[in-house]
Image (cartoon, rainbow, N blue to C red):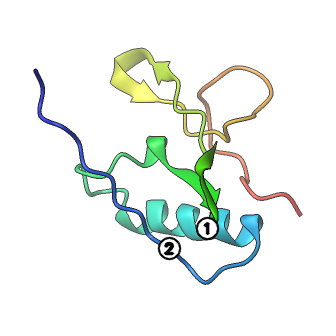
């Protein structure tokens, strides 16, 4: 049986989903080199509804053990360049 993985819940004072997503993107951009962090599994939830989670990235498996870095609800095929994740 594999060792259990640990999840770090990082509460914020942000009140808009787009802002929380931007923070997750900034954390991935600045800490992406840390191999112990699985950013593909990042989810968001409202403070009082933590059991309802929204996935940020698609994270589908790609050839070469890579994962799709595109938004969870992206159109088209997985892979390729990372588009702007935040809607304007």
Q: Which mark is residue 72?
A: none
Q: Is residue 21 visible?
A: yes
- Seen in the image, is 81 located left or right of residue 41? right
- Seen in the image, is 32 located left or right of residue 21? left
Q: From the viewer's perspective, is the residue at label 1 or at label 2 nearer?
A: 1
How crowded pointer 2 is (Cα within 10 Å; few <14, some 14-19, many 20+) is rated as few
Query: Residue reaching furthest front?
Result: 48
| Residue 84 drawn at (x, y percent) | 73, 54
Asked which quadrant contains residue 19, the reply is: bottom right
Residue 27 higher or lower than 74, as above or below: below
Residue hosting label 2? 11
Contact (Cβ within 8 Å) of mark 1 with mark 2 = yes
Asked which quadrant contains residue 5, the reply is: top left
- Seen in the image, is 66 located left or right of residue 20? left
Please report whichever mark, 1 or 2, sits nearer to the chain's N-terminal start.
2
Q: How many marks?
A: 2
Quadrant of the drawing holding the C terminus: bottom right
Q: Secondary structure at mark 2?
A: loop
Quadrant of the drawing holding the N terminus: top left
Which residue occupies the foreground of this view, 50 or 72? 50
| Residue 11 drawn at (x, y percent) | 50, 73
Residue at figure coordinates x 47%, y 41% from the top left: 40
- Separation of disc 1 and disc 2 at Cα? 8 Å
Residue at figure coordinates x 54%, y 63% from the top left: 24
Q: Is residue 55 visible?
A: no
Query: Residue reaching furthest top?
Result: 63
Residue 40 higher or lower than 20, as above or below: above
Residue hosting label 1? 47
Residue at figure coordinates x 60%, y 33% from the top left: 58
Asked which quadrant contains residue 16, the reply is: bottom right
């Amino acid at each position: 049986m594999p060792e259990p993985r640990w999840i770090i819940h990082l509460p914020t004072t942000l009140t808009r989903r787009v802002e929380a997503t931007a923070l997750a993107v900034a954390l991935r951009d600045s800490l992406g080199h840390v191999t112990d962090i699985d950013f593909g599994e990042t989810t968001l939830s409202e403070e009082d509804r933590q059991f309802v989670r929204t996935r940020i990235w698609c994270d589908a498996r790609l050839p070469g053990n890579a994962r799709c870095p595109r938004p969870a609800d992206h159109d088209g095929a997985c892979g390729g360049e990372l588009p702007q994740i935040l809607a304007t």
